[in-house]
Image (cartoon, coloured by chain):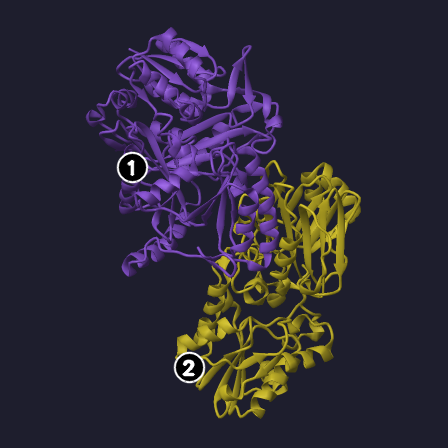
Chain colours: A yellow, B purple
Amino acid sequence: MAGIVGILAFDQVWNVSKFLYYSLVGLQHRGYATSGVALLDGKIREKINDVPPEDLEVDIGGWAGLGYAGTRRGYPVVTDDAALVIDGVIKVDLNEFSKRLVTDPESAILSAKGAFSLIALTRDGNLIAYRDETGLRPLALGGFGFDMGIIASEPVAMWVIGGEFRREVKPGEMILMSRLNVSTKQLREPRKAYCSIEYVYQARIDSYVNESEVYQVRVRIGELLAEERPLEADVVIGVPDTALPFALGYSRRLNIPLELGFTRTGSPIRTMLASDDFLKIVGVQLKLNPVRGAVHSKRVVLIDDSMVTGTTLKNTIASLRRLGAKEVHVLIGSPKLVSPCPYGVEVPEEKELIAANLREEEIAKVLGADSIHWLSLEGLRRALTSSSLCMGCMTRSYPKVIQ
Amino acid sequence: MKVLLIGEGAREHVLAESLGNSSESYRVYALSSYINPGIMEVVRKTGGEYLRGNVSSQEDVREAIRTVGPDFGVVGPEDPLFHGVADEFRKEGLPVIGPSKTCSQIEKSKVWMRELMWKYQIDGRLRFRAFTSLEEASKFIMEYGGSVAVKPSEQVGGKGVKVVADLQAYLSKEKRSALSRSVDEIGSLVKSEVKIIIEEKVDGPEYTLHVLTDGYSYLPLPLAQDYKHAYQDGIGPETGGMGSISGPGNLLPFITREEYEKTFEIVKRTAESISKETGDTYRGFISGQMMLTELWGPTVIEFYSRMGDPETSAIIPRISSDFGRILQLAAEGRLAKAMLEVVPEPAVVWAVAPLGYPLRRDLASGKEFQLDLERMREKGCKVYFGSIAYEGGKLISKGSRALELVSIGDFEESSRRLESCVKLINSNTELIYRTDIGRGIWEQQDKAEIVRYSYLNRVKRGTLGVSKDWSPNGGLW
């Protein structure tokens, strides 16, 4: 999982490093274990570190650059010919690939196997971007006034710096951006298979990805959860930040008051992305403290975005009970995750996924919940406006085989 | 009857065509600095003569008037107007389209324009500061956290506006220092004492209203919108316009009848105020380059003292009545007699430029073009020649937008038609054009609707046009 961004100034008077930096911070919800930038000013220099974008010290400048925030080390990759950032999975030798990319971008891209969005910056100052025909990974196109062109995983990367989002890059579309032109070419016919996880918890709620307003989709998921599992309860609470719109939709539909059930300690770092089990447990207790006044002597509906091992949720439920919750019913805003993702989304191995291994009643017992319900596959389809989805991690049926 | 047209761009080609097609059977004469193949065609067809010379030189124009002996004149571009070319016609007692040198200040001097708007309390005015020293201007930019637009105080051929939106305060140091550097750049190009004008920055969809006046009557043309970004999807540096749309009807899909009328009133009042201020009657085109903003609704960004390019090629081909005759009536002070009829369908214009426009004119000059005009016309596209010359039997680019392709019909249909026409152009360089002109109309409607909530709310609260900025050192502005 990654957030990627490329920025090019049409006038070399600009130093884009700060723009790149804040864009990247705007994408850190997509992954923050490691981050880096590469900037072109005569030559390409990079700065990479195993820290979230916020903590990355960018002491280099340039009029064009790339940024990466994610879970894979070493990005941006800088070769003799170009710098590259990739979200997703690409099966190529990057040195070889970047050489071909510079001389003949079209054939280089057509020969690359994988499911990915990529942005490359050549040494002579051209941005080359491609979103593969499935559109599994998002990619957006925009600018900053008359001064810069921007390509990024999500429009938020543009909005946080005051830029303008123009449109999403189409699946199968290549963008060539230089100081003298921006041209686009449809290299392959789209075979859309948008990642369901983007809608459910990956993208930011103020974002627009895969032809949808993320916030609206999430509220609708909450409403559909209410249709699927209307509960007798006194309050609805959602786990920040992703599950809050679910809770809002659920509350509205059933007229059960929405309460702010948690408050945060420290900066919002996604517990699911934390690599270490201990960190996950400490993480959830340290970062999300339940609010006693919101749950004491109440029958509580607790909504979360997804469940992997169930460890974090088990801890949360125990905390809620300690604070006086009379009942805790758990709703999950996504269908059961039962299978890993071959396209680079960090869904763990099947053996680590509780929903792939246990029946619902058993899971409720493990969690210590009064009841548990996952959004149905049908419910998710109904919540999304696009019918062309990848639901591989929920159905074990994948849209694209990568050799 | 003889008419002498001054200028050589696509706008003048459109004007030449409407004169050439008039039922008045004008003989069209033209003075251009290079041979525009489109104007040449009209001149030949109507039995006129094509003169070459400096269109901004009073002497060359005087000479042309003497040679041709026209019954009236039409001045297309702004630069000749700034140099008093329309005055040359009037000195000879000849009717002409185009304001005097004095009146054309409304376009030439941004400071004069804003001062006039404030003095006569014309709606749609913006707060501004004028600076004679670049240091002061830079200091002001650094001081005010509020959003400002920095412009050269006078028209400097194609040098654009630098705009800074300061919503993202954490970046402002970078933005401001880039701006201060561009302030130096702008200042070095401006000859007058006041170098820089800084205005409050506004946001919203842009549109243009052209009004033709003979000093007695005012004839508003259909609204048009031009697309300023050089590249596809609204990305890239500022240009004179890479395309435009006009219609349906007299409006645009995102501007209401009330807003159109309000805009007309603003432009008309401005022309009247210019006449009052200078004692010289404003005659010719005056175009409001407008923005629909939350501050005022219709808001003036700048005025043109002539028709816009490429707006002209979106507007005039939609006029079904005799526009050539309307020009003559306006020149002669009989505009009240004019009948303007417009086809209901909108028009879409694509400008086509050689690679290098607008940042590297050197790369965009001297390139060869070939086009299959006949097939383009068969497909329903009109073709106007702009920055391209007929030299030694070849079409050679002059560094700016070489061609403008026009299609009349609904937006989507026109886009498809233009897409097939643009393929019939060949060049020994890559071509720059935008296929998104007139597409994504709903986004503009949404943008307009958002500012409409706010300005209508201001009308209700009686705060239309009221705004302020404050900085700890500079105080209230």
Point 25% across, 21% down: residue: B329
B412 w.r.t. B472: above or below: above
Q: Position of residue A384 (x, y in %)?
A: 49, 62
Same-chain status of marks 2 and 1:
no
Residue at image mark 2: A256
| Residue B63 lies in quadrant | top left
- Disc 2 versus disc 1: nearer the observer: 1
Can residue A358 be seen here? The reply is no
* Screen quadrant of the C terminus of chain B: bottom left
Q: Position of residue A394 (x, y in %)?
A: 60, 67
Q: Nearer the viewer, residue B176 or A321?
A: B176
What SS does tag 2 mark?
loop
Can residue B327 be seen here? The reply is yes
* Screen quadrant of the N terminus of chain B: top left
Mark 2, chain letter?
Answer: A
Q: What kind of residue is marked 1?
A: Ser
What SS does tag 1 mark?
helix
Q: Is residue A122 found left or right of B299 in the rendered image?
A: right
Q: Nearer the viewer, residue A164 or B288?
A: B288
Mark 1, chain letter?
Answer: B
B5 w.r.t. B469: above or below: above
How many C-alpha atoms fall within 10 Å of the one at disc 2: few (<14), some, or many (≥20)? some
Q: CA distance from mark 2 to mark 1?
A: 63 Å
Residue B273: which numbered mark, if any?
Answer: 1
Q: Position of residue B251 (x, y in %)?
A: 31, 40
Q: Nearer the viewer, residue B160 or A41?
A: B160
A352 w.r.t. B87: above or below: below
Point 41% across, 49% down: residue: B127
